[in-house]
Image (cartoon, grey):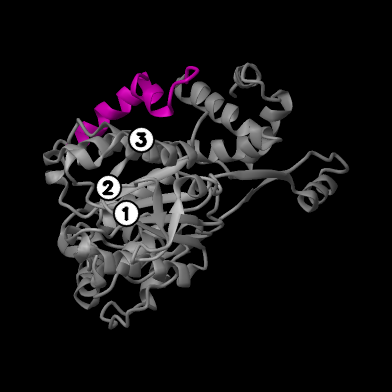
């Protein structure tokens, strides 16, 4: 089993040996590994002894298991694009989705990575879907409670594979007629995460996927009809879809993780093995959210969006108690930002870029201005922000089809990743921000 793995991992400077294979086999025997994503997590716990090893470990994993060799100075996306494993996956995916735009290569790579890293590692309990549905009333009124929103750390799954598919569809129709709000987590509503038999990104074997990405390729039927969404995810942000956007924004987490020795588990497992103590490692992930919000509030074209955007981010701050700072500018940055809406309290760009580089930066503006306004000094200020902060996203309220019509928008779009100012656009920006950077 994986006889060449130690040599491959050693070539990346990782401490892998025969013991690595023995621990990997033990994890398989205990039922901890079912997917490639599981192998990634288990091997990382075995091999990575220092945070600096995470980059080399990830490169070694892609090289050994997927034949994706990341050359020096090359991004992960570039390496994936030229790999045979991605080409084979893409060919199969496009056959199954004939209407999909093949030119949307970034989204294809994202879907490919989602499948590679699908994991069942956190699932500790499988619940019989029949038991859930017996206690559930599909005609329950929607009281507006969103359910548990911590859907990224599921510890249980539900199995609906023994239930007739037509029955599930009939129940889903009844739930849809009663549902009026966006929901996350839980076992009843059509939403994101959780163990409901209908929705997406959750853990429901044999259920019905409605939009979004799958949680583990477990659905029996996929429905993309927009009538199943209680909120229009492609509408501009406004009062009636702020909660849907909020569910996406709360997912911005710091991507670094520390590897620590799990002393209690090492001792406990060592005693079970009769005194053979093997180090058990654990990830300690910081979920601190640090956000800088830069809002263009200097022109009439932005007036319709400022209230909703400010309300969205302030609501996020009060609801999730994370570090949020808001600044304002007019069209572009001329050497300073402002900490108040009236733009009277100036903050120099030199002071601004002294902030922690781990802040995530959201820029909200239409990026449309007269070409002469985007001066060389202004461009240099934007470049300073891009170079200082690891993750930046530009949210544009104008329809995406109009972005190519303005010279300055085209330029800034080439400088920053630009997304529509919609719940779906914000969700996509957050997913991009949370991707691990392979060095």
Q: Marks 3/2: CA distance? A: 21 Å
Under circle 2, the secondary element is strand
The answer to whether residue 145 is left or right of residue 236 is: right
- Asked whether 23 falls inside the magenta stretch, the response is no
Label 1 – label 3 distance at C-alpha = 21 Å
Secondary structure found at label 1: helix
Dot label at residue 419: 2
Mark 3 or mark 2: which comes first in sequence?
Answer: 3
> In the figure, residue 111 lies in which quadrant?
top left
Mark nearer the N terminus (2 vs 1): 2
Q: Main secondary structure of the magenta part?
A: helix
- Other residues around mark 1 within 10 Å, as few (<14) / some (14–19) / many (≥20): many
Q: Answer left or right for 251 relative to 397.
A: right
x%, y% of residue 29?
63, 40
In the rendered image, residue 85 lying in the magenta stretch gets the answer: yes
Q: Which residue is found at the position 79% from the left and 53% from the top?
A: 264
Residue tagged by mark 1?
A: 426
Left or right: 248 with respect to 256? left
Mark 3 secondary-structure assignment? helix
Q: Residue at x 79, y 46 (%)?
A: 266
* Stretch of the chain drawn in magenta: 70-97
């Amino acid at each position: 089993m994986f006889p060449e793995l130690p040599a491959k991992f050693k070539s990346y400077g990782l401490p892998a040996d025969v013991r690595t294979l023995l621990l990997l086999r033990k994890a398989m025997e205990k039922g901890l590994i079912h997917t490639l994503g599981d192998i990634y997590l288990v091997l990382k716990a075995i091999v990575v002894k220092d945070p600096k090893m995470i980059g080399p470990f990830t490169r070694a994993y892609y090289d050994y298991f997927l034949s994706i060799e990341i050359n020096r100075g090359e991004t992960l996306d570039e390496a994936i694009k030229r790999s045979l494993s991605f080409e084979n996956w893409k060919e199969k995916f496009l056959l199954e989705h004939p209407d999909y735009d093949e030119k949307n290569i970034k989204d294809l790579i994202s879907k490919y990575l989602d499948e590679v890293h699908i994991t069942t590692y956190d699932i500790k309990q499988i619940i019989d879907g029949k038991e859930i549905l017996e206690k559930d009333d599909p005609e329950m009124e929607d009281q507006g409670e969103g359910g548990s929103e911590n859907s990224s750390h599921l510890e249980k799954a539900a199995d609906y594979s023994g239930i007739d598919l037509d029955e599930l569809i009939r129940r889903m129709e009844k739930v849809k007629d009663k549902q009026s709000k966006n929901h996350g987590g839980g076992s009843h509503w059509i939403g994101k995460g959780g163990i409901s038999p209908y929705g997406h990104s959750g853990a429901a074997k044999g259920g019905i996927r409605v939009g979004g990405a799958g949680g583990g390729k477990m659905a029996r039927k996929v429905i993309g009809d927009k009538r199943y969404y209680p909120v229009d995810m492609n509408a501009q942000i406004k009062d009636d879809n702020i909660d849907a956007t909020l569910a996406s924004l709360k997912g911005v987490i710091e991507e670094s993780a520390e590897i620590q020795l799990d002393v209690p588990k090492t001792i406990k497992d060592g005693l079970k093995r009769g005194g053979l103590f093997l180090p058990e490692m654990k990830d300690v992930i910081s979920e601190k959210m640090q956000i800088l919000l830069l809002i263009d509030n200097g022109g009439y074209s932005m007036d319709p969006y400022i209230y909703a955007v400010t309300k969205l981010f302030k609501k996020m701050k009060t609801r999730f108690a994370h570090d949020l700072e808001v600044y304002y500018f007019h069209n572009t940055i001329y050497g300073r930002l402002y900490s108040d809406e009236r733009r009277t309290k100036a903050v120099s760009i030199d002071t601004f870029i002294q902030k922690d580089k781990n802040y995530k930066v959201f820029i909200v503006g239409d990026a449309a201005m007269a070409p002469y306004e985007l001066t060389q000094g202004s461009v240099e200020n934007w470049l300073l922000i891009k170079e200082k902060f690891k993750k930046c996203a530009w949210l544009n309220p104008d329809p995406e089809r109009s972005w190519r019509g303005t010279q300055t928008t085209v330029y800034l779009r080439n400088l920053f990743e630009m997304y529509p100012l919609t719940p779906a656009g914000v969700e996509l920006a957050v997913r991009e921000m949370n991707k691990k950077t392979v060095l």
